[in-house]
Image (tube, helix red, strand yellow):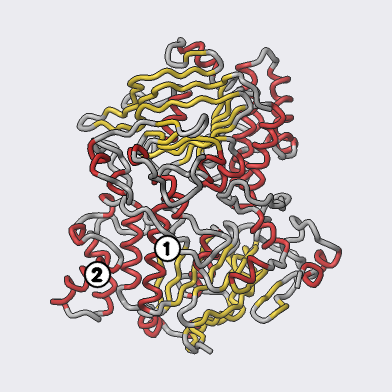
Amino acid sequence: MMSNEEVLKVENLTVYYELEEETVKAVNDISFSLHKGETIGLVGETGAGKTTTALALLRLVPDPPGVIKSGKITVCGNDMLEVPVQKLEEIRGKDIAMIFQDPMTSLNPVFTVAEQIAESIEIHEKVTKHEAYEKALEMLEMVGIPRERGGEYPHQFSGGMKQRVVIAIALACQPQLLIADEPTTALDVTIQAQVLDLIKNLKDKQGTSVIMITHDLGIVAETCDKVAVMYAGRIVETGNLDDVFNYTLHPYTEGLFNSLPNINDRKAELKPIHGLMPDPTNLPAGCAFEPRCEYACEACKTQQPELVSFTDTHKAACLRYAEPGFHVARGKKHE
Amino acid sequence: MSKTMIEVKDLTKFFKTPKGMLHAVDGVSFSIEEGKTLGVVGESGCGKSTTGRCILRLIEPTAGKVFFEGQEVTAMNSRQMHDMRQKMQIIFQDPFSSLDPRKTVAQTIQEPMKEFGIVPKDQLHAKTRELMDMVGLASRLINTYPHELDGGRRQRIGVARAISLQPKFIVCDEPVSALDVSIQAQILNLLKELQRDMGLTYMFITHDLSVVNHFSDDIAVMYLGQLVEKAPAEELFANPVHPYTKALLSAIPIPEVGGPKRERILLKGEITSPVNLPDECRFAKRCNYSCEECRKSDPKLFEISPGHFVACHRMNEFNNK
């Protein structure tokens, strides 16, 4: 169910956390867009800026210390950084909704689960309290929880069930854009499979666009249409699934793949990326990945690489590709 | 034939709760050979960590026996146990809460060596540096505190502390779950290197099946306090027999695009409560193949081919061999 209607457009977004003694450069000049019915995977390690990006889309970056320095975010035609706060309330939950990472802490312990789902329906739709509650029970059933349990409190549910409730809240008003921030990280594999299946079905049924934030490339391969790999607040490689998985360009993306145990070849040696992610208060002048990169050259130390298009869909930010014939060891070359 | 390092017989641990007996570990038996790694997988609450801790007697088992190189650990008095701990160590899951925030890296690493007095005082500092070097910690960090370090480095401290007494057996309780993939690979490689150099035997507890496949010689799958399947890693991945193992394996998201489509087995419901369990197969409620017999009695572990154990009433139908 893909069409050309653009649900989300992010242009040159930069977000800093300005503290007294230092500035954390969390997101640095990123741009991407998403069409109706599409799913994009935002991949990267802790501190790559994935969650800050998501919060910025909802204008939920904690301020202070968070500051959106520059950029433009358009969600369903609304300029998110310009609209008045009242309008923002309408957009959040209705056009754009978020599934937060930790189901254990994102529910209110003193309200029943159905009340929490009904709350967002009451705000956004012209319905009576009773109708909203009834619709909340329907939502519960849709995510696979019997409606009889609507009157129970979050502590009576297990982790997987709580995550379903959080999903039901997010989907209650049929948003155009759903941001799922590590929706299954806190869950066991069999429950993870159930939850991913659920998100996928809902996406197919309602044509929702999804931003899937994860550090698990396996989840990306199974649920996403395109991928953006983030490192130190920048997108270093982006493309559709086939591009990034089979025609890998950026050395960091290659490093991520090499760090994963291969399920088909248990004797294969892991090749970790050496070193650590740079301190976001003190990013290197050149490419942020340069200190850890085995392909780095002199120019990488001083020059910031730009995202360069390799095909219509595939972009990467690496200076080494200026040299003819250069390619990372993994993956096929584009023709 | 290499010798057996750890032997566990009918290990059982019940916890008393207001609602009744919680069967955390219920009659688990297995052995680990010297220099090998046993991977233990299962979902949260299946008893894998409790099993590991019972073996080290960090938790006293309710019943059952544990042998270390033929000596019965479960029969030792506290003095013998104290000496025993030199040979058996543990690496904890969470590098953020398993280190004393008021001790420096050096103090943390030295603590076990001081307790057992195996290193003369004047050599303690040199030995600490040597251990830090072995686990890849820069020696300039020797006087830093845990809060100054990231998760990967903290986990390295945990590893250094565990190997400081030259143990023979280490329980690794989800040692990489809290770490990013690139750091996870660094720690896994480190543990493998140490195993090769020091001849260590590991019990590797994890919920990540691709990690366990990479790391282990044998894999044991646990469900609600029981072993449901145990086999050499290759055999388990090639020929899983228990319906739960099959579902677990099919649920692993594989980071590949364009490969053959896999059939995913979705399980109904969730792990049931381990309190007051009825006498039936514990997996029956979620199993797509459960039959009448499964609700009547609890299946016993049975060796279907050399080294491959399964507990399922219908295993003969599921065995593809």
- Residue A220 is left or right of residue B244, and the answer is left
How far apart marks 1 and 2 lie (CA) works out to: 23 Å
Q: Nearer the viewer, residue B186 or A4?
A: A4
Residue A179: image x %, image y %?
54, 31
Q: Which residue lies at the image location 35% right of the left edge and 79% below the top edge?
A: B86
Q: Which residue lies at the image location 62% right of the left edge and 66% below the top edge?
A: B222
Q: Which mark, by number, is residue B51?
A: none
Whether residue A39 is visible: yes
Whether residue A101 is visible: no
Q: In what element is the residue under mark 2? A: helix
Which residue lies under the disc numbered 2? B110
Q: Nearer the viewer, residue A153 or B106?
A: B106
Chain letter of disc 2 in the image: B
Q: Which residue lies at the image location 30% right of the left edge and 65% below the top edge?
A: B135
Query: Which residue, as the protein is rendered here, is positioned at the far right?
Result: B292
- Residue B314 is left or right of residue B67, and the answer is right
B73 over B131 or under it: above or below: below
Which residue lies under the disc numbered 1? B188
Q: Amino acid at mark 1?
A: Leu
Q: Nearer the viewer, residue A151 or A240?
A: A240
Q: In what element is the residue under mark 1? A: helix
